[in-house]
Amino acid sequence: MQDGTDGPEKGGNGDAKPSHADDERSVLPPSVLASEEGDEVQAERAQQARMHAAVRRARLDVSQVCLIILTVLAVFYTLRIAAAILLPMVMAVVTNLMLVTPMRVITHRTHLPKPIVAFLLICGMFGGLAAIGMAVSVPAANWVSQLPEEITLVQSHLAILKDPLHFLQTTSLRVQQLLGVATSHEGPSVTSGFVPLGSSLLLGTQAFMGQLFTFFIMLFFLLAQGDSLLRRFVEIMPTFNDKRRAVQITTHIERNISIYLATITMMNLFVGLANTFQCWATGMPNPLLWGVVAFALNYIPIIGPFTGMVIYFCVALLTFPTAISALVPPAIYLCIHLLEGETITPMLLARRFTLNPVLVMGSLLFWDWMWGITGAFLSVPMLAVFKIVCDHVDALTPIGHIIGGPGSLHVVHEEEPAV
C-alpha cells in the first residue's frame, strides 16, 4: 500500500517555473518518489520531517482532547445504532472498488451505457454466488441432517478427554464455592413456541432482504454514476491544491483497495481449490463444501483460518476412526494457510499494502464487535482507506505512519518519468 503524503508546497512569485516532470514529482507523496534506491533515504527524511512538523503543530489542551474523544465516541455510537443502513452502504462502496476497473474496461471496449454494464456486472456477481450456493447447499444440508447421529461417534473419539474435562469442571465448582459465588443447579427457563420462532425468522429474513436491496441499489448507482459524483465533489474544492489532493486520495484508494481485493480473492480461490483437493485426497466427505468454506473464511485475517482449522478437525472426527488421524486435514489446512498468508500474499502486496499487524488485529476485533462477521470482512479495507486519507492530510500524517507496517516508507507505488 502507498504510505506517502503530499510533498511540501513549492513555488511562489519569486521561484522559477518548474518543468512538467518536476511539477509532477513535487506533488507526489515521498514514498512514491522513492522509485530508486538512492531516493529512499531522501523520501524517508521528507516523510519524517512532515510528521515531526505535524506533531509540533499539534498543541491540544484538555478541552480539545475531551472534545475529540467525545466526537469519536459519538461517531462510533452512530455507526453502532445505524448499522442496518450503514453496513450495506459500506459493503457496496468496497464492492464498487473491486468492480470499477472491469466496469470501465467493458464500457470503453463495448461502448455500452454505464447503467447496462453495471446491471450486467451485478447480475454476473450474484449469479456466480448463487451457483456456488446451490452447489454446496445439498451437501451442507445432508451433513447437517446426519450431524446428530455422528455426535456419539465424536464422543467415543474424545473419550480420552472425559476425565480431564470432569476434573476441570469439579475444580471450577470448588473455586466458586471458596469465593462465595452462588451456584444454581436449575437450568434457565426456556420459553419457546412456534409463534416466537416464526416471528424471529420472519423479522430476520425481512431485515436481510432490506439490507440486500440497499446493497444492490447503492452498488448499481455507484457503478453507473460514481464518476460523476466524484467530479462534482472535486468541483466544489476551493483551490487547485485541494482539487488535486482530492483526486489523489480517491485515485490511490481506488487503485490500492481494488488491487488488494482482487489479489486476496485470487489467493482465496487458490486456498479453496487446494483444500478441496486435500479433502478429496484424505477422504473427507463433500470436499467441494469444505473448499468453499476455506475460500470464504480466508477473507477474514487470522480468525478466519483458525476457525477453518477447527471446522476441519470437527468434520475429520466424524470421518476418521481416531482423533490422531483427524489431525491430518487441519494440519494440511495450516500448511496451505502458511504458504499463502506468510509467503505468497505478502510477496504480492508488500509493495503497496503494508499495515501494522497489531492494528490489523485490533481493527478486526473492533469491527467484528461493531458489525459482526461482515464488519470483520470490511475491517482491513476500511483501515487501509483510513491510512491513505491520513497520508494525504498533513495533520494526520503521524497517524498514517503509525498504521503503516515495517518498511512502509520505501513503497514503490508507480513508475515515474526520469528527470
Image (cartoon, helix red, strand yellow):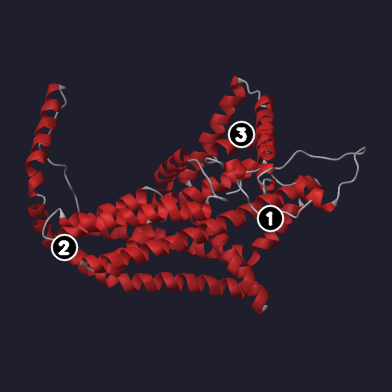
Residue in the picture at 55% in, 75% down: 120
Apparent side of residue 134 relative to residue 310 in the rendered image (left or right):
right
Figure check: 23 above or below 401:
below
Q: Residue at x 78, y 50 (%)?
A: 24
Query: Disc 1 vs disc 2: Cβ atoms closer than 8 Å?
Result: no
**Mark 2: amino acid:** Thr
Residue type, mark 1 in image: Glu
Residue labelled with disc 3: 398
* Residue linked to disc 2: 319
- Tell us which disc is closer to us: 1 or 2: 1
Mark 1 vs mark 3: in front:
1
Is disc 3 surrounded by few (<14), some (14 to 19) or many (20+) residues within 10 Å? Answer: many
Q: CA distance from mark 1 to mark 3?
A: 26 Å
Label total for image: 3
Q: Is residue 298 left or right of residue 41?
A: left
Residue 92 at x, y = what percent? 53, 59
Provide residue 151's location: percent of width, then percent of height.
12, 57
Q: Earlier in the sequence, mark 1 or mark 3?
A: 3
Residue at 60 percent of width and 62 percent of height: 222
First of labels 1, 2 by sequence position: 2
| Residue 140 can be seen in this image | no
Residue 26 percent location from the top left of the image: 77, 45
Among the two numbered marks 3 and 2 on one chain, the one whose residue lies closer to the N terminus: 2
User: Which residue corresponds to mark 1?
Assistant: 415
> Could you say which is closer to the camera, residue 346 or residue 121?
346
Distance of mark 1 from mark 2, alpha carbons? Answer: 53 Å
- The kind of residue on which mark 3 rests is Pro
